[in-house]
Each structure stands twice: as C-alpha cells, then as structure tokens.
C-alpha cells in the first residue's frame, strides 16, 4: 500500500461537511450521556476504501466511538491537547451557572451586559434553521472584516482565515439544516459581534467569533458566551463546546477540561500504514507535550522581540482624552454628524464615554469647536478628545 491516499478530518469542524466519510468509518458517535450524534448526519452505507489512511484529529475523549469494518482496519488513538467545554446538565439557567462558576467575579459580565443594553439599541439573533443568502453573505463578510481588523490590532495572523473559503461555502446550507448557526449581536441594524457555531445533537460548538473592536469596553466576547449559554438552556442543550486553545477566557468559563484524541485508522495488513500511523501519532503527542509546557508562548515572546512592527495602523490617527467639567465650550456650536467614516477614529472614544457614563447614544452629541479637538457632550457628562498630530 502506498501512503499517497490519506484523508485528513478535523472532527468538530468537519463532521457535517465530510459526513459521508465519517459515517463510512464510524458506526456510532455518542457523547457522554449516550446521545447519538450520528443521527444528525447523512449516513453512507458504502464501506471506507481500504487503501486510505484516515487521520481524524480533535476527537473529544468524552465522545464514545464505535468503528466500522474492524476486519479490515486497525485503529490507534493518541492523546492530543486539552479541550474546554461547559457541561450544562447540572444547572437550570445561565445565571445559576454564572453564580456557581464565577461567584462575585461574574459581576463584571452582568455589568457589561447591562451597560451595553442601556447605551444602545441592542438585539440578539440566533440564525439556526433559516437564513437567506443575502443576509448570510452580509454577516459572513462582516465577520471576516472583524477578524482581520482584530488581528491587525494585535499584530498577528488568524489561522482560521486559512479555511475561510470552505467555511463560507458550506455554512449557509448547514445553518438552514440546523447543523450550524450564526449568533449576532446587533446595535440597531448593525452587527457588532458575530459567532459561527456547529451543532451536534445538543452540543453547540462555538467555533469562530469576533466583534467590532470599537466596542471593546463592553466585553462583547463575554456577553456573546452569556447570551449563547442562555440560548442553550432554553433549547435544552447539554454542552457548550469551546474546543482547543489554552486561552484565559476558556479556563474561566469552562467546567469541563478534557483531552482530545487523534484517531488513525488504517489497513491491518499494511506495515507501511502502521509505521506512518505511529509516526503521525507520536508527532501529535510531542506537539501536545510542547504546548502543555508553553513552548509556543515562550517562542511567541522571543519572536516578538525581534519582529518588526507592522505599519498597518499608522494611517489611524491617535487621540488623547481629557476630562472637562462642563460643556460651555460648545455654546453656540452645532453638533456634527456622527458616526461618520471620515472620523471613525472617534468611534472607540465615543463608545468608551457611553460605557463610563451609561448615557444613551442618541442623547450624546459630538462637536468640533477647535481644529483637532472634539467634545463629546451627554446630558450630564463631557469628554474632550484631542487629535495628536
């Protein structure tokens, strides 16, 4: 057997898009309470080709898997990186979970949620079962722009964008089939936070999300998790799955830390396939070990010391803020139109002003009494924004 025939599948991302291959390999995939996940996928009764090595990555170890065609194939499992999830079964609602998990540390999340809703015209929408193509294209386009802008701000590259074309191509049908969803936070008609999720029979896998960084003060990422958990409880879901990646917010929110597995399925009689599987599996174990030892974090820090800073934001004006006690400086002045693309650098200071004062956005005016100086005037509070040359 040659080693040219290899099928790579990332379980939590591609169970639906590659469902025919998945169903030719596994006869059953259940999660820990024995709920069958494969009920949601189109089963393929054709046996998996024996001349192919199947590399199935990121299989949660709380999945119970049964394999097809054991007479032909051999299976090797290797431990991989940690995964993070929220098991919802022991709680009645999101606030009960918040109290148990965060205790007093959950207050900033509720405070950010309250202020967001007090300051803007906020609505929440879960597209799960129906979305028209035009709206889908619009939301997905904005999500990509949000990700690009966020990573430019961090002077990093997003690995998720490498799979963007495949994600965009399959997402629309999956949403309409209730196998995926788009969760959107709207300010009026404008999406300010977007999350794309996969659904696996009472498991919501929050795969990809981003937000408008002009609203950074409002902790939209935390609010997104809170509101999606609320939806999960209302729809009797068992797991809010956050996948891989050792990030602070995942450790804070999760109550289930588990280990992913790498499944390698190959023809029993092939020595070459066996050696290849062992090599791939040991590579997985090595990467998991290095990540557990934070080698990637140390590497990124060292690399950052020598990396030339990007110039992507040099065209964005810098500002400084000064507190003022009253708005007499704008007496007789007319407010300027806002928001406006030509002065979009004021969006973040404007939103931060709203967060601090809890004033409603329509009650706040923007003035430009002096060149390179702007005044944000609310009903009771004022803020000067000075443009730095």
Image (spheres, rainbow, N blue to C red):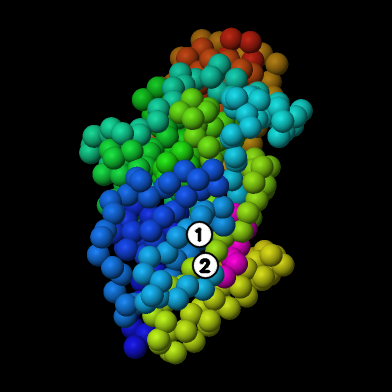
Task: Give x and y (percent) for residue 366.
Answer: 51, 21
Q: Marks 2 and 1: in contact by CB < 8 Å?
A: yes
Q: Quadrant of the C terminus?
A: top right
Q: Is residue 39 above or below residue 225?
A: below
Asked if residue 136 is among those painted magenta in the image, a careful observer would answer no
**First to last magenta residue range:** 78-83
**Disc 1 designates what residue?**
59
Residue sitting nearer the eye, 383 or 289: 289
Q: Which of the 4 image quadrants contains residue 68? A: bottom left
Residue that label 2 marks: 262
Q: Residue at x 42, y 64 (%)?
A: 67
Crowding near the residue tagged with mark 2, few <14, some 14–19, many ≥20 C-alpha atoms within 10 Å: many
Instruction: Measure the C-alpha gap from mark 1 to mark 2.
Output: 6 Å
On the rendered structure, is 188 left or right of 385? left
- Residue 36 in the image: x percent, y percent? 43, 46
Which percent across, then down, holds residue 339? 43, 27
Q: Which residue is drawn at 26% across and 58% down?
A: 44
Placement of 317 over or under 104, stated as above or below: below
Quadrant assignment, res 329 = top right
- Residue sitting at 59 percent across and 54 percent down? 83
Q: Which residue is drawn at 53% across and 82% down?
A: 279
């Amino acid at each position: 057997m040659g080693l040219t025939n290899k099928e790579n599948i990332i379980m939590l991302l591609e169970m639906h898009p590659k469902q025919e291959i998945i169903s030719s390999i596994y006869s059953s995939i259940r999660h820990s309470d024995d709920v069958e996940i494969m009920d949601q996928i189109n089963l393929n009764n054709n046996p998996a080709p024996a001349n192919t090595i199947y590399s199935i990555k990121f299989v949660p170890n709380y999945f119970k898997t049964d394999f097809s065609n054991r007479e032909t194939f051999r299976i090797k499992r290797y431990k991989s990186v940690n995964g993070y999830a929220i098991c919802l079964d022991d709680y009645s609602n999101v606030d009960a979970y918040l109290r148990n998990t965060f205790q007093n540390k959950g207050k900033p999340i509720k405070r950010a949620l309250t202020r967001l809703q007090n300051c803007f015209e906020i609505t929440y929408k879960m597209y799960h079962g129906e979305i028209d193509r035009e709206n889908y294209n619009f939301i997905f386009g904005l999500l990509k722009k949000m990700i690009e802008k966020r990573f430019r701000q961090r002077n990093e590259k997003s690995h998720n964008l490498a799979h963007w074309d495949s994600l965009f191509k399959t997402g629309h049908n999956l949403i309409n089939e209730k196998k995926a969803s788009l969760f959107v936070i709207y300010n009026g008609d404008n999406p300010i936070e977007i999350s794309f999720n996969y659904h696996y029979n009472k498991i919501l896998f929050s795969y990809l999300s981003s937000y408008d960084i002009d609203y950074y003060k409002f902790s939209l990422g935390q609010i997104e998790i809170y509101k999606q958990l609320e939806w999960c409880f209302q729809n009797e879901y068992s797991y809010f799955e956050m996948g891989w990646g050792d990030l602070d917010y995942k450790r804070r929110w999760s109550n289930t830390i588990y280990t992913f597995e790498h499944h390698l399925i190959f023809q029993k009689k092939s020595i070459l396939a066996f050696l290849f599987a062992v090599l791939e599996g040991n590579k997985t174990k090595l990467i998991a070990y290095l990540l557990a030892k934070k080698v990637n974090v140390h590497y990124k820090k060292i690399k950052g010391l020598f990396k030339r800073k990007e110039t992507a934001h040099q065209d964005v004006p810098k500002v400084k803020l000064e507190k003022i006690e009253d708005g007499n400086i704008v007496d007789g002045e007319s407010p300027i139109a806002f928001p406006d693309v030509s002065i979009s650098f004021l969006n973040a200071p404007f939103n931060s002003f709203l967060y601090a004062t809890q004033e409603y956005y329509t009650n706040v005016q923007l003035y430009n009494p002096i060149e390179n100086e702007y005044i944000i005037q609310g009903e009771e509070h004022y803020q000067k924004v000075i443009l730095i040359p």
